[in-house]
Amino acid sequence: MLETIAFRGSSYHTYHVHAIIERRFSKNVILSEPIRIYKHFSIEDSLYWMSALNSISKQWDNVAQYSVSIPDVNIPFGATFPLKLWVAPLSKGLKLQALTINVVEQHELKINAPATYSAQFNVHFLSSKKENVIFSEGHSLDDCMTLESGESDIEWSATKWISLPQDLEAYSQDVSSSMIKINHQVEFTVELLGMGGKLSMIKGTIPFNIYMSPQVISEHGTVRRLHVDGSLDEYMDPPPLYSKHQNDLLLPVLRDPLNTGRFAESDVSLRMICGQPLDNGCFNSAVFDCAPSYETVI
């Protein structure tokens, strides 16, 4: 089933819940409310993006070496994540002028052409492409760069945050189907000012995947802000606090080492929960025991 693909200005695929109240002596009451349906980001989706690179490291002629990276190619909808820039000039007198960051959404639609149109023009498919900038931010030298070494002409580094809109109507998640493809990429432009006032620019793009997550959309339909600064594994639900831990549950294990058909009585009467005997049975064994509590270890 195709997920919801609807935002301001475009409604490629939508869902509605219809309800009809039938009345005998009056007109029926018909209600319709839009709903949004999204698929859960799966391991298969993550593996699809495994080969994608989340960084670019190159040398531009004899002008400069540079590296641009984002923390992951899979970014939750509405999240904030850093773009890290590193530049090492290879020529004297080179100064960093500005950094521009854009997040571009690309749409590609493909539908079957009507029979009459196909027969007249020998065209089997109709396609359309468009782009939409959902985030744009520029940084000057004073605003953007911090020196990584003591010498001002050695290298520069900076970290700038990209904040995706928290509006479901502003843009879409990534979509890939036979008729609709929606992709996203980070576009960056680094402006360098050389001797004599000559302006040079380094441009590049990093494709990435925007996905929906239960952690993103609240029960009221608003978008939560997630801060991404590492891989997806860092954004799983955290374990409980130490003060709210529970003792491990020890399940009974029956042993018969001599194959006599009889089990040791001590193996049957196992203590199920530390400090809480079950049916007045308690087994004090160092082998079959619950994990110690944090307070005991400390």
Image (cartoon, helix red, strand yellow):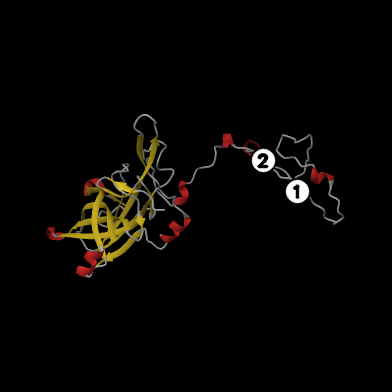
Within 10 Å of disc 2 (Cα), the crowding (few <14, some 14-19, many 20+) is few
Closer to viewer: mark 2 or mark 1: 1
Q: What residue sits right under mark 1 in the picture?
A: 253
Please say whether residue 177 is visible from this viewpoint. yes
Horizontally, residue 29 falls left or right of residue 250, namely left
Quarter where residue 193 is shown: bottom left
Indicate whether 207 appears above or below 4: below
Q: CA distance from mark 2 to mark 1?
A: 19 Å
**Residue 171's disc number:** none
160 horizontally vs 288: left or right: left
Return the residue nearer the eye: 184 or 175. Answer: 175
Give percent across and percent down for residue 89: 25, 60
- Expressed as whole percent of the image width and height from the top left, the position of residue 276 reads 72, 34
Q: Residue at x 60, y 37 (%)?
A: 245
Which three-letter amino acid code belongs to the residue tagged 2? Pro
* Residue 161 visible somewhere in the drawing: no
The residue closer to the viewer here, 231 or 66, is 231
Q: Looking at numbered disc 1 in the image, what kind of residue is underneath it?
A: Val
Q: Local crowd at mark 1 within 10 Å, few (<14), some, or many (≥20)?
A: few
Tell me where residue 235 appears, x and y as whole percent: 45, 46
Contact, mark 2 vs mark 1 (Cβ under 8 Å): no
Q: Nearer the viewer, residue 263 or 93?
A: 263
Is residue 243 found left or right of 51 in the rendered image?
Answer: right
User: Reading the chain from its start, which is encountered first: label 2 or label 1?
Assistant: 1
Dividing the picture into quarters, in which one does residue 266 lie? top right
Residue 120 on image: x %, y %: 20, 68
Residue 298 vs 133, above or below: the answer is above
List the residue tagged with mark 2. 292
